[in-house]
Amino acid sequence: MTTPRHSALVRITHWLTVLSFFALLVTGLELVISHPRFYWGETGNVNEHPLFTIPIATSRDTIDNGYGSNMPDQNGWSRYLHFESAWLLVLTGLVYAFFSLLNGHFRRDLVPAPGQRAPRAYFERMTKYLRRGPPDPGEADSYNVLQRAAYLGVICVLFPLVIWTGLALSPSFNSAFPFFVDALGGRQSARTIHFFVTWAIVLFFVVHIAMIALSGFWSRTRAMILGRAQEPQERP
Amino acid sequence: MTKISRRKLITAGAAAVAGAAGLTAADKIARRYGVVPPDGCGIYGPGETLTYAAQRLLTRHTLAREFSRSQISEKPFANAIAPANDQFKKLQAGGFADWRLTVDGMVAHPLSLSLSDLRAFPTHSQITEVACEEGWSYIAEWIGTPLSGVLHEAGVLPQARYIVYRSIEAPWWESIDMSDALHPQTFLTMGMNDGDLPVGFGGPLRLRVPRQLGYKSVKFIVRLTATDSMKTFGKGLGSASPEAGYAWFAGI
């Protein structure tokens, strides 16, 4: 027996987000190695004090951090692909947000249920995870409170923030909407926050994959592709 | 079961057809309104066209952020060394007295201007940030004359769509659309922070395009050409940047 798990909207936008996020991550890391120094405020360059420097070899000789500059310089297509992927991410996010608000997916599946909003609910579910207890009966076709909080955090906080800080790096966008970069404390602050929010999303990704692996990697992945999950739930 | 999958198949098919039709229509509209950039082809074409179209919709007349005098970087980073060619060295030895800026192409009166001719144009200044695509940036005061005044003097024809600008240092050449060319902050820059523009920052003459990244602000400018099409310049992609793998529109 199978039970409905993910709607077509969730499945399609999920995989488009995976695709765009990986393209953004790989190209973003390639761009970082051309100047692996980070600053706070409006300006930052090799003549100014950095907030921190990543101790890795660079792809450009405009910077000397003591590790050489023999990394592959692929900024050209990395920039092209970064922005094309960013469009895919933004458009996918808009479609997802619009229809999720419209069809109740947001309210029904992501916002914690009225009885589940107290800190105690989070604590109890976390305790159950740590004791490796079996999932609640309702979790075959619904998310528990920790999942809801994690997904809401990524969808409503991390992705909007990474898109905002990315846009704040565009001098042309900033000419139309200076508030977006000024509110972050300047261009270099925006770049630094963009970098850290990326790692926060990577952290989510690692935990997400770990949880999927614990609850049955292929059955979970099949559910996100085909939309239906095995019932009763498999245990590893 | 069969009924449901058939309905799903029909829905998916209709969605695919609608998507393909939508893309074709979007491509036609983009071409009609001239928001396909010269390098808007190939696998990155859709992304570049979306970016350029969105920017032109939102930023046609917006001004780059300007800063206060106290925010000028004390130690700006000069990433240029003097061009190694003999022509530049000879001009530098003569204090750039013989530097010439040629203005040609789709103009009523082609010009050849010395630096002192350019200084006779109204002098403006702006305190704006240079942001390199690598990630670093600095703020400086840039002193010069808006490109629009020089183009007006040359009588740029109404059908011109791009201004091509060339450096004395091969292979640097770039182009901008008329929205950027006639923009009040696009300067032919001869001074920086109350002095002459140093060679390390593109002196004696640099085109500042503050709404785009540093690589569009080409140093050591010797020639401006007005044109209605980029097809006959280089590989037809708009500038040396796409030929080297970089986007023509660098506003982001």
Image (cartoon, coloured by chain):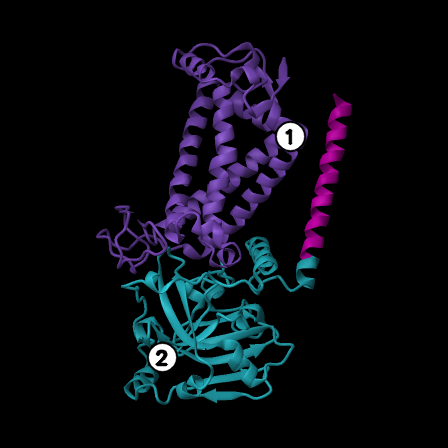
Q: Which chain is purple?
A: A
Please provide percent x and percent y for residue A23: 48, 44
Please provide percent x and percent y for residue A225: 59, 28
Say which colour chain B has: cyan
The span from disc 1 to disc 2 (Cα, nearest Å) is 60 Å
Give residue B2's quadrant in the image.
Answer: top right
Label placed on residue B204: 2
Residue shown at 58% from the left, 77% from the top: B227
Give residue A101's quadrant in the image.
Answer: top right
- Residue at which label 1 appears: A8
Residue at mark 2: chain:
B
Q: Main secondary structure of the magenta part?
A: helix
Please provide percent x and percent y for residue B7: 76, 29
Which residues lie in the magenta part? B1-27
Residue A229 in view here: yes
Residue at mark 1: chain:
A
* Above or below B143: residue A174: above
Which secondary structure, mark 2?
Answer: loop
